[in-house]
Image: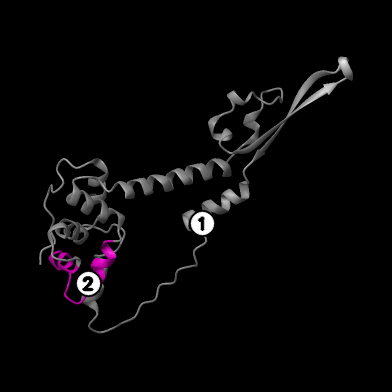
């Protein structure tokens, strides 16, 4: 079966849909285009060029691909898969906020004379890394002679080490070392070829 996708199947689609489609390999594109009108996920996989033996399993794998879902949802409803786009945006925002904490430089809160800047003048990045502010007024004298002579502010930041640890987990730096094992199994060449074309990530176009 041919897996060559139409030249412009998403004319007029939103940019996020077009970008998602471009990240897919040829078989993934063919699967995404076939699924809305196919009898089943397996049928769509067969139309995309997968073998009868692997179509069911690989169809299930492909529908988990966020880019496939964006394209299919658009073709089905005429709208982008908002929940997927929002989810990606949420991850990016989370990483951005964690980076602010991990890279926070307290020196930017002070002027050249070492005085704490007014809160309204704090740089946005450092302000968003602050977890709490406590203010204490200092007084001198007693009774009617008691006067305020200053203000002490206690600025507490979110934990830098915790932020670095969280960022490392998000980025997958703590994943166990991957070891590749190659096995020679007769008669599996076709199955492996199918799997290579159905990964959840983007693949090369042929």
Question: Can you identify the residue that label 1 sits on?
Answer: 169
Horizontal relation, residue 176 to residue 146: left or right: left
Give the extent of the magenta segment: 42-63
Which residue position holds label 2? 56
Which residue sits at x=27%, y=44%?
16
Residue 202 at x, y = what percent? 29, 57
**Mark 2 → mark 1, Cα distance in angstroms:** 33 Å
Pick the quarter of the image with the N terminus.
Answer: bottom left
On the image, the x and y values in percent for residue 107 come to 65, 32
Report x, y in % for residue 162: 60, 51
Query: Badge 2: few (under 14), some or many (20 or more) residues near its Cα, within 10 Å?
Result: some
Q: Is residue 206 visible?
A: no
Q: Main secondary structure of the magenta part?
A: helix
Which residue sits at x=30%, y=55%?
66
User: Is 169 above or below relative to 129?
Assistant: below
Is residue 189 visible in this depiction of the protein? yes
């Amino acid at each position: 079966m041919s897996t060559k996708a139409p030249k412009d199947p998403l004319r007029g689609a939103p940019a996020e849909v077009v970008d998602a489609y471009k990240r897919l390999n040829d078989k993934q594109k063919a699967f995404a285009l076939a699924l809305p009108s196919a009898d089943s996920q397996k049928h769509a996989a067969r139309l995309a060029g997968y073998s009868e033996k692997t179509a069911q399993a690989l169809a299930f794998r492909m529908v988990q691909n966020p880019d496939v879902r964006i394209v299919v949802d658009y073709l089905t409803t005429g709208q982008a898969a908002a929940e997927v786009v929002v989810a990606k945006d949420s991850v990016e925002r989370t990483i951005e906020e964690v980076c602010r904490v991990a890279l926070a430089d307290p020196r930017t809160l002070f002027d050249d004379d070492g005085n704490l800047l007014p809160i309204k003048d704090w740089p946005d990045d450092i302000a968003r890394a602050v977890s709490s502010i406590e203010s204490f007024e200092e007084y001198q004298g007693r009774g009617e002679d008691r006067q305020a002579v200053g203000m002490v502010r206690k600025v507490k930041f979110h934990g830098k080490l915790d932020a670095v640890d969280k960022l490392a987990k998000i980025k997958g730096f703590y994943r166990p070392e991957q070891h590749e094992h190659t096995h020679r199994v007769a008669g599996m060449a076709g199955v492996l070829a199918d799997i290579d074309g159905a990964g959840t990530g983007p693949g090369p176009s042929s």
